[in-house]
Image (cartoon, rainbow, N blue to C red):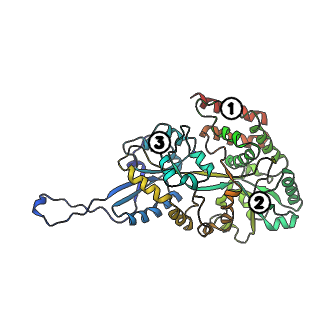
Amino acid sequence: MNKKLSRRTFLKSTAVGAGGLLAVTLADRTNFPRIVHAAQKRTLTITTIAGSPASHLQFASKSFMAANPDIEVVINVAGGAETEYKGSFPQLVASSDKPDFAWYWVDGRQYQDIANAGLLEPLDDMYTSEGWDKALPQSVINTYTSPDGHKYAVCESIVWYPQVYYSREAFKKAGVEEPKDHYFKSLDEFYAACDKLRAAGYEPITIGGKEGWIIGHTHDALLQRVATDDQLNDLLTNWRKGSTPKVRFTDAPWTTADKLLLEFGQKKVFAEGFLGRSYAEGRALFVQGKAAMYQDGSWAASEPILYKEAPKLDFGWMIYPQVDPKIQPKFLLYGGNGFMIPKGGPNVDLAKKFMAFIMNKEQSELATKAKIMVSSRNDISADAIKESGPHVAEMFPLLKTIGTATGWDDPVPADLAERSLILWPDLLGGRITVDQVGPELEKVADQHRKE
């Protein structure tokens, strides 16, 4: 978040571009001295999942082929559930049937195993030559830097989380001022706002707590607000083989974030009954005007979600409040959508050429403007980003000024992240205590350190 299959049997092939290749077979070429044969096109094969990644690749490949008529791009879109692709891609990239170019999730899970096994081309030279080392957010670059110091993928697109969207009408009725700089400057201010909203008849923040990843987003935000950059970086990486933790899950600041999450529950920050609601059910309370605030990511402020479900709702956004006066609250940035090049293929040069093309500023702006995704580049123009909607357009430039960090459960191993997502509902539901959380995670992490 395995059985071995070839690309031909596992993927549904979708050729993007004009027609088939022109093939001329001659029994005796000397009999046709005046015939000029068309140069055979080189084929670049790409593997991806359906949805936004496939749309982005199809969008860019059309322009790429128009500029390079000697190249045919064939995009193979994985069928079935995404979980199938997650498990099968590591086998595919190690096989003789590997693609020339691929989309995959960049995290501390299957991706890092692929990179560690030497199955991907290093891209350090492209980070320099293409300017990605300056055009991409530092938190993304950190995530894409493997333990050996090299980079084997580049970030295609970004989302950020968790935002708290709020009803301006509810805030006005409850006498709550919209927070300056998009966040309350202390927990006391934040809790006071929640109290006023409840007194005015609103539930404060609604979330679908039945799904642990949503609570995990809250914990990730709280952790960023109580951990220094060095502490957070250690918690993001101290599970790696042979590592010696500077900070453990049984100590502060991790336990500080655990206690704050529990405090949110005890102070009724979340809407009553939140642990029994799904993602969509949690949002429904906000759309229906029963809750004043709703926690979600940047993707929620879009046409398919809030703009469609609540077209008349006037809402603003903020991030969770400052906790430690010395630590600036930041957006958590997810940049796990990665492009990579399997090592040793016959078309590495073409793959790099296409990667440079799809990641350049012009193409990134065109894809963002077409509402396919939000580019990972931090130099996207305001004209392009405004097509993503007014809220995203307002947030995007603030990623640089407010700052970004990486959420803890994105880069860590699957079993470690999934264990935490079970623990959070148990903690908020009173089934376990704060003292029981850290040791459970430490067991999982320690196993990875020994592997």
- What SS does tag 1 mark? helix
- What SS does tag 3 mark? helix
- Label 1–label 3 contact, CB within 8 A: no
Identify residue for label 3.
Answer: 90
| Upstream in sequence: badge 1 or badge 2 | 2
Give neighbour class at mark 3: few <14, some 14-19, many 20+ (Cα, 10 Å): many
Which of 233/20 is in front?
A: 233
Give neighbour class at mark 1: few <14, some 14-19, many 20+ (Cα, 10 Å): some
Q: Residue furthest top?
A: 450
Identify residue for label 2.
Answer: 182
| Upstream in sequence: badge 1 or badge 3 | 3
| Mark linked to residue 255 | none
| Residue under the image location 74 percent in, 38 percent down | 254
| Upstream in sequence: badge 2 or badge 3 | 3
The three-letter code of the residue at mark 2 reads: His
Q: For residue 284, what is the image quadrant?
A: bottom right
Q: Which image quadrant: the N terminus?
A: top right
- 261 lies above or below 382: above
Query: x and y percent of residue 421 in the render?
Result: 68, 43
Give the CA distance from mark 2 to mark 3. Answer: 41 Å
Query: x and y percent of residue 406 in the render?
Result: 65, 47
Give the CA distance from mark 1 to mark 3. Answer: 27 Å
One can see residue 422 in this view: no
Query: x and y percent of residue 410 in the render?
Result: 62, 45
Give the CA distance from mark 1 to mark 2. Answer: 35 Å
One can see residue 398 in this view: yes
Residue 11 is left or right of residue 420, and the answer is: left
Residue 185 is left or right of residue 50, and the answer is: right
| Mark linked to residue 442 | 1
The three-letter code of the residue at mark 1 reads: Glu
Residue 418 is left or right of residue 286, and the answer is: left
